[in-house]
């Protein structure tokens, strides 16, 4: 049985849930397909579910726990009539309206849902090193966001992994707080731009560890050290750091939209000008799935608001043109 909805939001991070608050207050009774608690990219609530203290979300003088903030977003949207389903979308058909969405078997002949308008807020995931203890210590010394967590490492010695612009930007930013930042790169040459390389090399708090891979992160409740290996000699050693920032890139969650929505080579969805319109009329995108520049909870929430307003006005125009 296919369930027909006026508006469906895929994703339940700050972007998707802010879109839900606005859409439900506009009486559109949105359905949020919130993901599945299976991996670091699909869990309901998005990336904030993997962080602890959030101190840069406006309105919380003493900070707020990431999961607590997302529960509040969720309840706020529910209060105005948002429906939720905990599931993962396996296929979409955006070739005709209403759009078709499949949950579960992507080969089923009928879609699970249809939607007149669709808001894509599927976010992005940080690429991780896949270390044995990395996921367990995420939020307890392992971080993927220097802007979010740097403040907690005042006076500490920490490490950043990666050789691209993100890694250098994070390392430079972290020197505001940390006494020492060790930049660990697997090769002997950085991928980052010249200007960033120059800036990082000129920073006396940054030390480079070349041809080195992190092979595990150690600590009972918090990071106490990392295990590293020299890729040229094979020699293994332990580096005593209290923080490990993984900055090896991000990947937007756009696989199900390939060939249907315009995206950059890197997979990020393209939106039109300063709006949340995609190339398919009636489909809007917000949050990290279309933003590799800012990637903040507050900017994601802002663009979620924009997507709901864009969708609401578009639905109104559709209704007006039918009369
Ligand atoms: P990136 O350019 O793809 O760099 C990723 C880095 O992580 C590379 O040095 C790579 O090593 C390393 N890496 C990847 N997988 C790894 C693994 N499993 N173990 C260890 N190291 C690994 O990603 P990014 O730095 O996030 O940048 C993405 C894009 O955004 C780039 O175009 C960048 O210029 C842009 N950006 C710009 C700015 C800025 O201009 N301020 C800031 C941030 C990002 P290899 O070099 O050996 O492949």
Image (cartoon, helix red, strand yellow):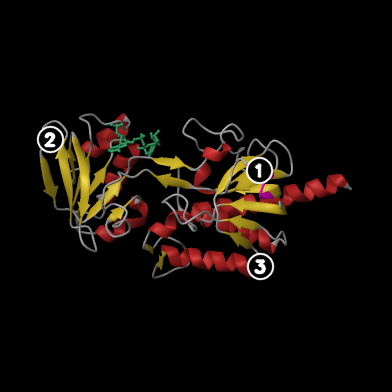
Distance CA(mark 1)–CA(mark 3): 22 Å
Query: Dot 2: few (<14), some (14–19), or many (≥20) neighbours within 10 Å?
Result: few
Name the spot of residue 47 as percent of width and height, x first: 43, 54
Q: Is residue 111 magenta?
A: yes
Lateral position of residue 273 relative to residue 95, left or right:
left
x 68%, y 63%: residue: 25
Q: Is residue 158 visible?
A: no
Lateral position of residue 91 relative to residue 207, left or right:
right
Residue designated by label 3: 80
Q: Is residue 119 magenta?
A: no
Depth check, front residue: 276 or 31: 31
Residue designated by label 2: 234
Depth check, front residue: 246 or 207: 246
Depth check, front residue: 44 or 154: 44
Query: Dot 3: few (<14), some (14–19), or many (≥20) neighbours within 10 Å?
Result: some
As drawn, the label of residue 283 is 1
Q: Nearer the viewer, mark 3 or mark 2?
A: 2
- Which element type, helix, strand or loop, lies under badge 3? loop
Main SS of the magenta part reads loop
x 59%, y 42%: residue: 106
Q: Which residues are magenta?
A: 108-113
Depth check, front residue: 303 or 114: 114
Name the spot of residue 38 as percent of width and height, x first: 44, 53
Distance CA(mark 1)–CA(mark 2): 50 Å
x 49%, y 35%: residue: 267
- Which element type, helix, strand or loop, lies under badge 1? strand
Query: Dot 1: few (<14), some (14–19), or many (≥20) neighbours within 10 Å?
Result: many
Q: Quadrant location of ligand 1?
A: top left
Q: Is mark 1 within 8 Å of ligand 1?
A: no
First along the sequence among labels 1 and 3: 3
Name the spot of residue 221 as percent of width and height, x first: 24, 64
């Amino acid at each position: 049985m296919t369930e027909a909805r006026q508006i469906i939001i895929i994703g339940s991070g700050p972007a998707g849930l802010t879109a839900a608050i606005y859409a439900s207050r506009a009486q559109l009774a949105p359905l949020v397909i919130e993901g599945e608690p299976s991996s670091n990219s699909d869990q309901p609530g998005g990336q904030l579910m993997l962080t602890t203290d959030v101190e840069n979300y406006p309105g919380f003088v003493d900070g707020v726990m990431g999961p607590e903030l997302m529960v509040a977003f969720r309840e706020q949207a529910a209060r105005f009539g948002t429906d939720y389903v905990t599931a993962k979308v396996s296929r979409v058909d955006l070739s005709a309206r209403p759009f078709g969405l499949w949950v579960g078997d992507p080969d089923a002949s009928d879609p699970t849902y249809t939607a007149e308008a669709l808001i894509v807020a599927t976010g992005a995931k940080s690429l991780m090193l896949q270390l044995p203890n990395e996921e367990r210590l995420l939020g307890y010394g392992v971080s993927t966001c220097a802007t979010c967590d740097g403040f907690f490492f005042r006076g500490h010695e920490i490490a950043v992994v990666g050789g691209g612009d993100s890694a250098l930007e994070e390392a430079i930013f972290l020197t505001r707080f940390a006494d020492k930042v060790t930049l660990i790169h697997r090769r002997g040459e950085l991928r980052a731009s010249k200007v960033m390389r120059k800036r990082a090399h000129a920073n006396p708090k940054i030390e480079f560890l070349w041809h080195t891979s992190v092979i595990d992160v150690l600590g009972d409740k918090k990071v106490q050290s990392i295990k590293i290996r020299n890729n040229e000699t094979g020699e293994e050693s332990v580096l005593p750091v209290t923080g490990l920032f993984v900055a090896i890139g991000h990947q937007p969650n756009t696989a199900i939209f390939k060939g249907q929505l315009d995206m950059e080579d890197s997979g990020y969805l393209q939106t039109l000008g300063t709006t949340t319109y995609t190339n398919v009329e009636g489909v809007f995108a917000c949050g990290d799935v279309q933003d590799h520049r800012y990637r903040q909870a507050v900017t994601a929430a802002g663009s979620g608001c924009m997507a709901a307003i864009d969708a609401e006005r578009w639905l109104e125009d559709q209704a007006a043109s039918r009369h």
